[in-house]
Amino acid sequence: MTINLAKTEIIHFVGIGGIGMSGLALIMKGLGFNVQGSDLNLNKNIERLKKSKIKVFLGHKKKNIFNSTILVVSSAIDKNNIELIIARKKKLPIYLRGDMLAHIVSLIKKNVVVCGSHGKTTTTSLVSSIFSKAKLDPTVINGGVIKSLKNSAKLGKSNWCLIESDESDGSFLKVLPTYSIVTNIDKEHMDYYKNLNLLKKSFIEFIEKTPSFGKSVVCIDDKNIQEIIKKIKVKNYLTYGVHKKSNFRIYNIIQKTNCSYFDLLIKLPGKKSFVINKIKIPLLGLHNIRNAAASASICKIIGISSNFIKQGLSKFKGVERRFNKLKTYRGSLIFDDYAHHPTE
C-alpha cells in the first residue's frame, strides 16, 4: 500500500494512548508531521505525548476529527467507533497502524525489525542499548517504555530504525526488514490466524522478505522455528540459541541473583569461528539470555564491535513492566511483569 503524506495534513490517531500508537505518533511529530489523537482515558503514554505538544482528546467524539485529513486506527478500535464512522462519511483516508508504520520506516534507510511471540520488547530495547553505545543514534519504535529513554519511542539522527513489529494482526508483514530477529513462535492470536499453521506461514513470509544485503536471525531452540526454517525458500537467515548447531551458540551460562553471564560462540559460513567471552546482562532467566544473544547476533552481523556489544548489554537499564524488581516484602521479592500468556 502506497501512502503519500504531505506535512500539511492533519493526522488523527484513534486510540493514541496505546503503546504502539503513541510511539508512532511521537516519531511522526518529530519528523514534522501535524499529529493529534484521541483515547478513552488519560494514561502515562498520553502524558508523554502532551509533553511533546501533541494534542490529545479524551473520549471519542465527532468533533475531534473536524479538521483531520487522515485517520490512523489501532486494531483494537471497534468498527462502530464514532470517529471512524464520521471519517468514512467524509471519505477520509483511513490507515491501520501497521500501514502507517511501514510508510514511516520506508523514510529511514536501514532497519532492524524484531518480532516473535515473546521477548520482542526486551530484545528491541537491548539492540537499542547496543546501538546507543556504538553512537549510531537510531530511531526507536518499541512496545514498552525503555527506562534509559523514559519513552517507548525516540527519533534518532542516523539512518537506522529499530522496530518492534506486531504479529497479532498480521501487520508485521507490511514492514520490509533490512535485518530482523525472530525470537520464537507460540500459539497466540488465534482470533486472527485461526490456527497455528497459518501463524507459522506468516513468519515464513516475514523471514523470506529479508533482502540479499540483509539477514534474519532466528532462535533455533524454539520447536516451531525449527519446523519453519525447513520450509524457507530464501536461506538468508542465521540461527542463535543453546542448540549445538546454532550459528551464534550460547554456552558457559552463569546465573546469579541480579545478573547473568554467558559466552557466545560465533560460527558463520566461510569464516573462522570466534567467541565473545563473558557477556554480562543485568537480567535473569534463560529467556533473557536468549534475548541478549539475539541482540548481540544481529549487531555483530551489522558490524558493531564486540566491545560495544558487551557494553550495551551490561549497561542495559531495562524496560518498564518486564520483570522489574519493586521491593522485598517479608523476605519475598516482588516483581512487576507484563506476562499475559500461559507460556510466560
Image (spheres, helix red, strand yellow):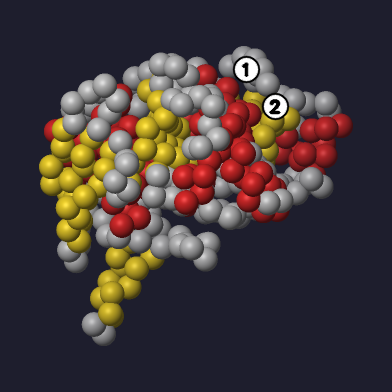
x 38%, y 18%: residue: 159
Question: Dot 2 corresponds to which residue?
Answer: 70
x 83%, y 28%: residue: 90
Please give the label number shown on residue 328. none
Direction right: furthest residue: 89
Neighbour tally class for label 2: few under 14, some 14-19, many 20 plus, Cα within 10 Å: many
Asked whether, in this view, residue 44 is left or right of residue 268, the answer is right
x 52%, y 19%: residue: 106
Direction bottom: furthest residue: 330
**Quarter of the image containing the N terminus?**
top right
| CB atoms of marks 1 and 2 within 8 Å | yes
Question: Dot 1 corresponds to which residue?
Answer: 5
Quadrant of residue 297 within the rendered picture: top left
- Residue 4 picture location, percent across and down: 65, 15
Q: Secondary structure at mark 1?
A: loop
Q: Is residue 238 visible?
A: yes
Quadrant of residue 216 within the rendered picture: top left
Q: Nearer the viewer, residue 85 or 57?
A: 85
- Residue 10 picture location, percent across and down: 65, 25
Q: Nearer the viewer, residue 295 or 16?
A: 295
Neighbour tally class for label 1: few under 14, some 14-19, many 20 plus, Cα within 10 Å: some
- Nearest to N terminus: mark 1 or mark 2: 1
The amino acid marked with disc number 1 is Leu
The amino acid marked with disc number 2 is Ile
Q: Nearer the viewer, residue 226 or 122?
A: 226
- 147 up-or-down from 65: above or below: below
Distance, label 1 to label 2, CA atoms, is 9 Å
Q: Is residue 146 visible?
A: no
x 31%, y 67%: residue: 326
Q: Secondary structure at mark 2?
A: strand
- Residue 255 picture location, percent across and down: 20, 61
